[in-house]
Amino acid sequence: MTAHQESIIDQFTRQAIPFSKLYAHTNQESLYLLREMASVSEKDTVLDVACGSGIVSCAFAEVASHVTGIDITPAMLEQAQILAQQKNLINLSWQQGDIETLPFPDATFSVVLSRYAFHHFLQPDVVLSEMVRVCRPGGRILIADVALPPDKVNAYDRIEKLRDPSHTRALTLEEFPKLVADANLQNVKLAFYKVELGLEQQLAASFPNPGDDQKIREIFREDIGVDSLGIGAHFRGEQIHYAVPIAVIVGDKIA
């Protein structure tokens, strides 16, 4: 196991329970958007790559024939199983594994998706190629993740690495379409939305290194009215809030 994989498991073992309760992750409107863009139906078998605590998997399982969630962190998969039980969903299965070498045969699924995970990947192109490999011809690939202008991404990455040391880097608005084009996906659709977050709530669900939480607060305060981070930091009452821009990109695997 690589040091980066160990960092992810360390962070998300600790984040497993608070992560599952954040409104940014459970917001129904954004989940409905993903289902609509993926054109998921009762005929579909779905793979959720880096499924975390199963929020997206369960949302898709309400419609699809079957959903498989794969993640590297056992504690996240435990939360996913609990969520599925709470929702009385039985058409799901969970697997621990490495997303750079997905343990499934070619052309296994009709929809393959990943939400809020690509910024953790050292090789997003490798992950996407694996997603395409296990997707059937005529199936759909969906990615949803933070996407920033090129002049904002370095500053954003700096604070995210302070907040979550397993963060790698966010893709830019230019990189997302190129990634999909390089994977030869067709009939590409793109949508955007923003996730509103409270800084203190986010820090309470995170596990930065000692002292880094205060550095993050200072960076946010200095960025209000400046927006070098690209996330529109602002005060709501006495609390700092911000809005992370999310890109959703969907393409068809033609052959």
Image (tube, rainbow, N blue to C red):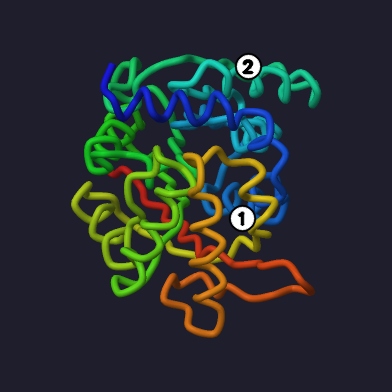
**Residue 46 bears which disc, if any?**
none
Toward which corner of the image does residue 127 lie, by quadrant?
top left
- Residue type highlighted by circle 2: Glu
Is residue 147 rendered to the left or right of residue 232?
Answer: left
Tag 1, which secondary structure? Answer: helix
Image point 53% across, 16% down: which residue? Answer: 74
Q: Quadrant of the N terminus?
A: top left
Q: Nearer the viewer, residue 163 or 135?
A: 163
Whether 74 is drawn above or below 235: the answer is above
Label 1, label 2: how far apart the Cα atoms are: 26 Å
The residue that disc 2 covers is 78
Residue 223 position, x and y percent, is 50, 76
The residue that disc 1 covers is 33
Image point 30% across, 61% down: which residue? Answer: 177
Tag 2, which secondary structure? Answer: helix
Q: Residues within 10 Å of mark 1 (few under 14, many from 20)?
A: some
